[in-house]
Amino acid sequence: MHFTKKTNIEKRSDLVKLLKSNKLLRFPGAYNPLCAKVISEIGFDGVYISGGVMSNDLGIPDIGLTTLNQVSYRSEQIAKVTDLPSIVDADTGFKNCEKTVSTFESKGLSGCHIEDQIDEKRCGHLDNKELISTKEMVEKIKIAVKTRKDKNFLIIVRTDANLVEGLDKTINRIKSYEDAGADMIFPEAMKNESEFEKVRKNTKGYLLANMTEFGKSKLLDKKQLENLGYNLVIYPVTTQRLAMKSVEDGLKSIFKEGHQNNIIDKMQTRKRLYELVEYEKYNTPGKKITDFSTEGHE
């Protein structure tokens, strides 16, 4: 159930307007809908939905095993609970870019990114990745752009070429991807400021930076990324990593001590949880449960 006020079309329009403002937009990853509500409440610009996080949540590695149905179902749940725009990781397009874009747009997402790896993909910060040809990727992009109904649904293109072919060939790919109609480029696994800067100098459109922990990229702050000319930054796995570390530590404590009394102060309180899920709105006199629609809306 949700209490969002904005339509999917409005959320997409908001994102495009924000991009035109030339400020750096910050999109933390949400591993579930409740996390998306926290992201919104704190005041971030949008929500990111990571394919890696989806895989992790299912207990499997991020190597292209998840399906469009799995990712789109969870993405819709996350996007519904916030008025912020949400963008999703569409891996390599689930072998059908037309169906992928159409599905995510219909589920209320504000954009998706598709990468140029082979379908048996790897996490963007691992070695031994394999790419499809520039020509094949250009065709995917053209299909994605042609498929969307709302021109504000962002077609974001991720290139994993830096660790495979080097930065110069990455830039060549980026130019071809922009010419094919990509709204935003996501250059994966840039190692330092110099590489981020070189990409910016050789591209004309919007750029997305990935600040994932424990990866190939140096972690840059908001001011550094703004000065480098990037438009949007994602923190894809941060919230899941924070949560799972706390869960693991807490469970170890309970297993050892036999109780949870010494870790209560590390838990979200019942009061805080009820604030986030807006529990009191269900207690409004005259309101029926059916008034709180779970259906998406344009």
Image: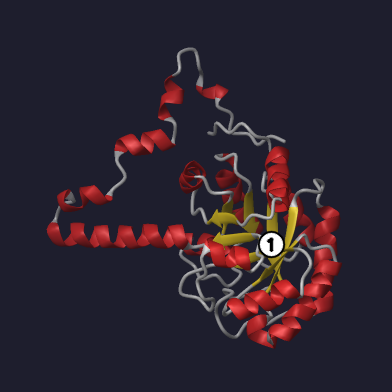
Q: Is residue 153 left or right of residue 84?
A: right
The residue carrying mark 1 is 113
Q: Position of residue 195 (x, y in %)?
A: 64, 79
Question: Whole-percent x and y of residue 69?
Answer: 64, 54
Residue 116 visible in image: no
Label 1 sits on what residue type?
His
Q: Nearer the viewer, residue 233 or 198?
A: 198
Q: Is 148 above or below relative to 50?
A: above
Q: Which structural element holds mark 1?
A: strand
Identify which residue is drawn at 49% across, 63% down.
237
Tell me how many marks there are: 1
Q: Quadrant of residue 89?
A: bottom right
Q: Quadrant of residue 198?
A: bottom right
Residue 187 at x, y = what percent? 67, 72
Q: Residue at x 63, y 73 (%)?
A: 188
Q: Quadrant of residue 255?
A: bottom left
Q: Is residue 70 visible?
A: yes
